[in-house]
Image (cartoon, rainbow, N blue to C red):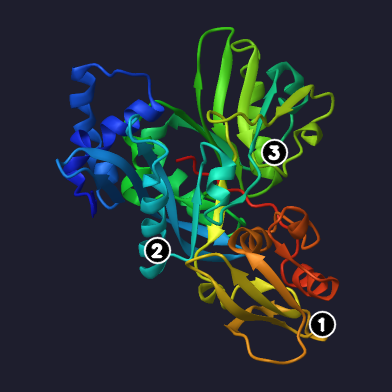
Amino acid sequence: MKIRQLANEERPVTTWPLQGYAFEPSPMAAADAEKLRDHLPYHRQNVTLVVEEDGGETLAAVSAFPMRQNVRGTVLPMAGVSGVATHPLARRQGHVRTLLTQLLGEMRDEGYAVSALYPFRSSFYARFGFAGLPKPRTVSFSPADLGGLLNADLPGELRWQRVRDGYDAYRGLTERLLGSRHGFSLAPDYQAVRLRDRDDRWLASAWLDGEMIGAVTYRIDEHGGTLTGDDLLTVGPLGRALLLQFFARHVDQVARVSMVVPADETPELWATDLAVQTESRIAFPSSVAPMARVLSLDALDGLASGPGRVRVEIVDDPFTAGDYLLDGGSPGSGGGRLEVSRAAGGAVPTATLTAAGISALVYGVLDPEEVPLRGLGTVPADAAVELRSLFPRAMPYLFVDF
């Protein structure tokens, strides 16, 4: 058996049959399989590793593509992991473990500071240092409940078009959110344009002074049915209010409006007498929350942080293992930028963490007191105080589904 990196043009006959079997209705018609070649441009810079038998048959595959992610205000290179699939007769033989370890190591060596994925089962990827992130919520309501917004005199304007025609401005809005929203991530341009090329969505957008301040892509299934939106993206309350006003105008066309919002959104407060259903459903392997991990602690140098100083020993990880000193400044300074260095001796509070433990703290999804309860490390009380100050709780919003 051997491991090798795949060339893009090989995908239709090597990895895509495995991935199709794992994630799509199968078997696929031969004519549909041939059409997959049209998707090659959307994968041209993906890094795909495969393990092959001596005869050349592909037994397993793992892919990563170059993304960017906002981590506490700093945009870092992120490896988005996807397409993890194994031949049905070669499962549970350690192939994915081998491939994923090599892939993450290669991506780290190329400068990717963090990685994220959507797991088929969280416990499997927790062994690779990934920590769970919150899943966005699905919100559903009747447009009739937004009637009070119809006559509201709001500044700004609404625009409605096919996503193909508004794609550039929409992409610009996501770039703006990438710079301001913790956890927000973006796929590379060559992959993101699939939304434009499919052109199977409407785009409703809110504008103020010539700038897009909110947008949602959506489809309508039938008259009297549901307007199903993707992620509701806004830079503030005005953009959201304008888009809700747009939905209110569909009162005589659809019975329900549905869309995706970040986990920290509060739809029950959007309008008076809004009967809204907010849901986040986890089911394996079909409806999962994302996970992320830190691939390089050194790459976090300069990250926004609170005050604090602590030594952390990262254990049981091939990428981040070692002793580090994390310094966010003295309490009187109010904190600022994290300094990461190799730890030396001295009377500094010390915590022992797994890769998943430090990742959960960096992303802000666990308090230091929760880390040992989850089996992700040992955090004495004095170290917990420093870590809590360095990495306050935060709510990451991954956005891109891949």
Q: Which residue lies at the image location 60% right of the left edge and 70% below the top edge? A: 314
Q: Is residue 21 left or right of residue 238?
A: left
The answer to whether any part of residue 332 appears in the image is: yes
Residue 138 or residue 105, whichever sits in front: 105
Q: Nearer the viewer, mark 3 or mark 1?
A: 1
Distance in Å between CA atoms under marks 3 and 2: 51 Å
Q: Position of residue 178 (x, y in %)?
A: 53, 56
Mark 2 or mark 1, whichever is nearer to me: 2
Q: Position of residue 201 (x, y in %)?
A: 43, 27
Which of the pair 62/8 is nearer the observer?
A: 62
For image coordinates 48% across by 67% down, the residue present is: 319
Disc 1 marks a residue whose amino acid type is Pro
* Dot placed on the residue nearer the N-terminal end, 3 or 2: 2
Q: Is residue 86 above or below residue 228?
A: below
Q: What label sits on residue 331 in the rendered view?
A: 1
Q: Quadrant of residue 399?
A: top right
Disc 2 from disc 1: Cα separation: 36 Å
Which x, y percent locates residue 19?
Answer: 34, 33
**Farthest residue, direction top:** 224
Marks 2,1: beta carbons within 8 A = no
Q: Earlier in the sequence, mark 2 or mark 1?
A: 2
**As displayed, is residue 86 above or below residue 333?**
above
Q: Which residue is mark 3?
A: 154
Q: Which residue is mark 2?
A: 105
SS label for mark 3: loop
Quarter of the picture holding the C terminus: top left
Spatial CA span between label 3 and label 1: 43 Å
Work out whether 326 lies above or below 35.
below
